[in-house]
Image (cartoon, rainbow, N blue to C red):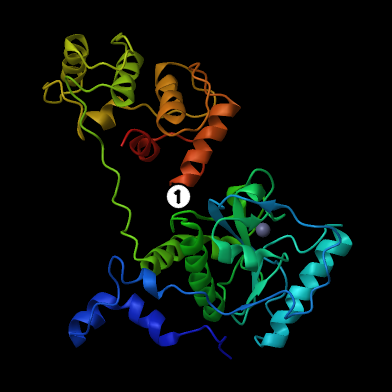
Amino acid sequence: MLPPNYSMSRRNLIRGTVVAGAAAGTTMLIGIGSAEAEVSEPSIHSAADWGARPPSSPSQIMNTRPQYIVVHHTASSNNVGDTQADAYSIARAIQGWHMDENDWNDSGQQFTISRGGHVLEGRQGSLDRIRTGSSFVRGIHAGSPANAESIGIENEGTYTSVQPPEALYDSLVDFCAYICKQYGIPASQIFGHRDFMATQCPGDQLYARLPQLRADVAALLGEDPAPPVEWPVVKRGTVGERTRSVQFLLSEHGIDTVADGDFGPTTETNVRQFQSTKGLVDDGIVGPKTWPELIVAVSVGAKGEAVKAVQRQLNHTHGIATVVDGDFGPGTDTSVKTFQQRRSLVVDGQVGPITWKELVG
Ligand SMILES: [Zn+2]
């Protein structure tokens, strides 16, 4: 049974826009501006609909917009029905676990999606707040600081070894698009619970689906796909953190260079020297051929100038508070992982070519 907000035809049209649209000669459905109008509030069952108990104490209201969405699975049985009554049943069960066993004031997560694709309010007040687009009810679902920064969605079932049903997935796409539209959240800012704490949640299978989820939500929102990050061109006259990274890295390679962020004649000479040693064209310009030679992979335990470059980039360019001391300790590890999570990279704390390119690109 399909939920009321489920539209097979629309989803299929969106997924096949280019081919189907061109072949049929129909109006483009997806384009900048046109798609956004398509994102409207899906059918959401309020907590009153499913017979929620009143909260045992008021939930905290955040008078800010959440910055991202956290996807969970309920780790409950997949062997359940897909009707509205089944959906109400899981919503009540979760509230019972959270209030009676965890001693929380209400359901922890703001929303739930059932195996049948029904979207339900969890934590009471969440639905009214999402309609404001400027405030939200703080949840209990992903620890600190995520609880104060995000909307949590529990997806009914266990997705460690099987994929969620299509009805659930399609509702998740529509609902995430609505949340993103209401709060101005980019589709890239959809994460899994395990991105924030040590947990299996939302299961390997659902977690592996998140890149597709981001892409499907981006398509609904009419977002331009994020352009791939390229190595920047840094040369004589370039001033700023990219130049400073080049200078730190030259020093790391034994060519001592003052890290003043100003690409002057000495830095240029040093780049030419580095290029010669690597068999590169010694034009003194740091571009896509020189960067991969210049970077040095670093992770926990590393010390030196390359680590300083990473720390400066994190702290000064990307706004992730990091001490610049040339010592890659736990604090830098946390900062790198935060950065990797934001960029939808593998979150492993290893600063290799992909992370380097994102840092300086
Ligand atoms: Zn979770």
Q: Quick check: 41 above or below 354?
A: below
Residue 64 percent across, percent down from the top left: 58, 49
Quarter of the image where ligand 1 sits: bottom right
Q: Quick check: 187 above or below 313?
A: below
Q: Quadrant of the N terminus?
A: bottom right
Q: Is residue 349 visible?
A: no
Considering depth in this image, is 306 or 65 the residue closer to the camera?
A: 65
Badge 1 crowding class, 10 Å Cα cut-off, few under 14, some 14 to 19, many 20 or more, is: some
Q: Quadrant of the C terminus?
A: top left
Side of 202 relative to 177 (left or right): right
Quadrant housing residue 301: top right
For badge 1, the amino acid type reads Ser
* Residue displayed at 72% across by 71% down: 76
Count of labels in the image: 1
Q: Which residue is mark 1?
A: 344
Q: Quick check: 112 above or below 351?
A: below
Provide the secondary structure element on which disc 1 rests. Answer: loop
Side of 120 relative to 275 (left or right): right
Residue 277 percent across, percent down from the top left: 19, 17
